[in-house]
Every structure is written in C-alpha cells, then in structure tokens.
Image: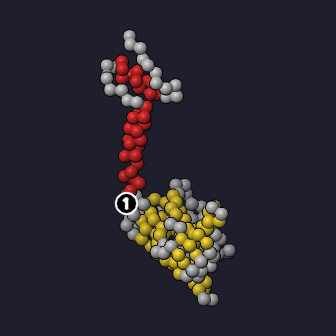
C-alpha cells in the first residue's frame, strides 16, 4: 500500500480527493490553488447567464436635478416574464404652488452620512396602493418631483409573474428589490 502525503490540515476534502485519485492510479494531481480556481470557474460559469439575462431596471435620465424639477423615472422589465409591483396612488408633488398627482411604485432613499434612509414622501392618510403588471420587454414611466436635497436613489420592490390581484397592504413572500443609480438633488 502506498503512503498518502497530506497537504493541508485545513482542507480534509482535499486530502480525500488526493487519496481517491492516487489509489485509482491516476497521475494527475492538483495543487490546492488549482482546485480552488477550478471550483471558482465552475461556479461563475453557472451564475453568469442568469445575471446577464434577467433584469428589472429602475432608471432616471439624469444624475443631477434641482429641487422641484420633474424627474421621469422608468421601470423596465428586461426579463422573459411579467413582473408585478405596487403603486402608491395618493402620492402628490408640488410644482410652483400647484399640486400634481404623481403615483409612484418605488420608495425614495437619501444618503445621510454613508447610510441610506427612506424619505417619507407618501400621503399621511388616504393613500391607496394597487398592483401594476408589467409584461416582458415593457417599460413604464413615473414622473415625480422632490423638494429635498442630497444624494438619492429609488428602490422598487417587485414580484415575478403576473399577479393583478396582489394585495399591496399584505404582500406575499418572494419579494425582490432593485435600486436605481444614485442621483443628486441640489
């Protein structure tokens, strides 16, 4: 019987691997680094197609806005299936003293001292939330205005599939989230 040399006390799986292949009269021996690289390549090759193909995107056309300036945010469904999200219907924005109805499907977050916090811009009382289904390849625009300043981003919670009867007050499990790129309000 051959003596098996152990290479690492921290990698018993590696020692078992070497023992298996040396007893089977195979002369190919991998170093621990080569084994890790091989596993990394296998893992990345399995993940990359799903990352590149299916996306829901929240975008804003500019990176800089002034307070009360109109922001045309867009939700794009680049997946192969419908997605469902909730829209707050009682939302309003102020424009030169006039009130505009601006339903929003996302929350607005501001960065303060390196931490993201949600702005309270929704209605205090009487807001209504409804489900919106966006089919594969479809996009929807949501114009709104902000009177606050700082570094902002938009966060959208959504569910895979067409769920027109989704109860937005008591949403089901399986929620996914996506955030926009950061933009600035002066």
**Residue 161 shown left or right of residue 182 in the figure:** left
Residue at the (59%, 69%) spot, across then down: 151
Position in image of residue 78 (x %, y %):
39, 64
User: Splitting the image into 4 quarters, where does residue 37 fall?
Assistant: top left
Asked whether, in this view, residue 97 is left or right of residue 17, the answer is right
Residue 164 can be seen, yes or no: no
Q: Is residue 5 above or below residue 101?
A: above
Mark 1 falls on what kind of element?
loop
Q: In which image quadrant can residue 98 be found?
A: bottom right
Q: Residue at x 57, y 60 (%)?
A: 171
Residue at the spot of label 1: 80
Instruction: Looking at this view, name the residue that lies furthest to the right.
Output: 124
Q: Is residue 62 left or right of residue 150?
A: left
Q: Residue at x 59, y 77 (%)?
A: 186
Instruction: Give the percent coordinates (x, y) of residue 79.
Output: 39, 61
The residue lying at 66 percent from left, 63 percent from top is 113
Is residue 96 in view? yes
Q: Residue furthest bottom?
A: 97
Residue density around tag 1, few if under 14, some if 14–19, many if 20 or more, within 10 Å: few
Question: How many labels, in total?
Answer: 1
Residue 110: horizontal and vertical position, in percent? 61, 68
């Amino acid at each position: 019987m051959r003596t098996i040399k152990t290479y690492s006390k921290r990698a018993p799986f590696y020692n078992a691997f070497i023992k298996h292949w040396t007893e089977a009269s195979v002369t190919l021996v991998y170093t621990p680094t080569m084994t890790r690289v091989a596993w990394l390549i296998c893992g990345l090759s399995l993940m990359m197609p799903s990352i590149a193909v299916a996306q829901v995107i929240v975008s804003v056309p500019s990176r800089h806005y002034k307070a009360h300036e109109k922001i045309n945010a867009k939700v794009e469904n680049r997946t192969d299936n419908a997605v469902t999200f909730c829209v707050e219907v009682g939302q309003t924005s102020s424009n030169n003293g006039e009130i505009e109805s601006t339903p929003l499907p996302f929350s607005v977050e501001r960065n303060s001292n390196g931490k993201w916090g949600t702005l309270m811009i929704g209605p205090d009382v009487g807001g209504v939330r409804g489900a919106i289904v966006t089919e594969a390849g479809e996009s929807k625009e949501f114009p709104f205005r902000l009177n606050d300043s700082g570094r902002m981003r938009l966060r959208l919670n959504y569910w895979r599939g067409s769920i027109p009867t989704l109860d937005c007050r008591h949403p089901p499990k399986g929620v996914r989230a996506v955030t926009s790129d950061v933009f600035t309000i002066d």
